[in-house]
Amino acid sequence: MTELMDLPIDLMIDILLRLSAKPLMQFKSICKLWYYIISAPQFADLHLAQTLAQSNPNLRFVFSAPHLSIAEFDTFDRITELNNPFRNQGFAHVVGSCHGLICLCNYDLHLTILLYNPTTQTHKKLPFLPKPSTLSHRYSFGFGYDDISRDYKFVRILQSDEGTGPFKSQVMVYSLKMDSWLRAPDVPRPFSSCREDGVLVNGNLHWIHESFNGKEKDYSIVGFSLVDHSFIEVPQPTFEEEFINLRVGMLDACLCLMVNDLDYSDIWIMKEYGVVESWTRLFKVKQTKQHLFLEWPIAYSLNRQSLFLQLNTWRVVSLNLQTMGVKDVKVCDFPRCFDTQVCIENLIMLKDSGSATLETDYLQEKKRRRRRKQLRHQRNNREEC
């Protein structure tokens, strides 16, 4: 260790960048120089880029069962419950993950949104964003990274109910770099997503749009660009057989479709983004009484002999790619396991805006609304007089 500290600073940084995030977090306490090096945002960016370039980065499973927990990748061993800020404040739903950051939404706490890093145990609470009173509670969420602006973004889409008046929508995008919300162009046409959380592929968030054509359902893939905040429609493959539903996911950094019917679940992948001819069916999985509809792929195992999948009954299963057999993955002693994500260890430090409780923003906004209502009532009374 002494020899390492005597090295030139550039060589020292190069050696430290080769280490994984967990020991680096511990090395911050060795000396002030290492603390400032490892704590620097530039070092965290370089370390993340190097980690992402590795063929086998240090991966972890993050899931709810029912509390948010982390486990060894591929085995679900060494499970540890995460001490996240929502731990004792209601149910925390995992909207998505990107570069090891977890986006959490607390439905029990007025839709409070948090970005949380399990590695550094830091978090960032997004500024409270009230819901317009003219819009219904139909939400769609998404979280991802904009490679052009090098910024993490969260998207909240609100839509009015169809058939209850003129269609209205509100699309808001949060920028971590700016720590503020931006109003994006409205939804071009109503879409009802069977999965409210967008799937990030190629800089776009994706949802499956369901609509009724007479007595039958039509499906399309709706995309939202994190770069220019525009909506797109992604071409889907042509299916020969009838199907009950579609689910969108990501596999090997490619857009993926789960096509479910009564007898089989097919797994399709778009090898070249945006090119309809590149859609390829990878696997065809026979339905059983124990095997219900596949929701989305989680990841291949390390030896790529099996594929982890999330089922719609809050189960994680392993698909043997040689036999096409499906078996449940035993996670803790809980009968349900959901919101499963794959995360990498990183050094990103998220800085919260203050030490106030998570309910503070909501309560303050509620108080302001009550005061505005009182002022309107008083003004109306004066006008009547």
Image: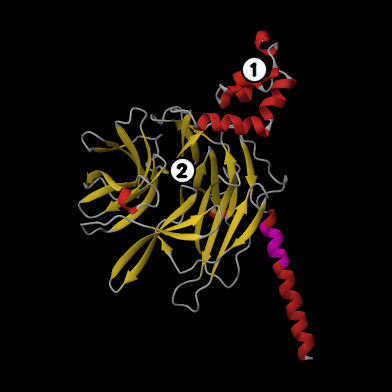
Q: Position of residue 171 (x, y in %)?
A: 56, 62
Is residue 37 magenta-colored?
no
Residue of label 2: 66
Q: Nearer the viewer, residue 255 or 351?
A: 255
Query: Can the viewer see residue 30 in this picture?
Result: no
Q: Position of residue 29 (x, y in %)?
A: 69, 21
> In the shown orientation, is residue 133 left or right of residue 243?
right
Q: Which residues are magenta?
A: 362-368
* Rendering quarter of residue 27: top right
Under mark 1, the amino acid is: Leu
SS at mark 1 in the image: helix
Q: Is residue 57 above or below residue 105?
A: above
Is residue 364 magenta-colored?
yes
Task: Spot the residue most to the bottom.
Answer: 385
Q: Is residue 68 above or below residue 231?
A: above
Q: Position of residue 267 (x, y in %)?
A: 29, 46
* Residue at 66% over, 8% down: 3
> What's the colour scheme?
secondary structure
Task: Spot the residue most to the top.
Answer: 3
Residue 11, numbered label:
1
Q: Nearer the viewer, residue 232 or 57?
A: 232
Separation of residues labelled 1 and 2 (CA atoms): 45 Å
* Residue at 36% over, 57% down: 235
Q: Is residue 367 above or below residue 173?
A: below
* Rendering quarter of residue 309: top left
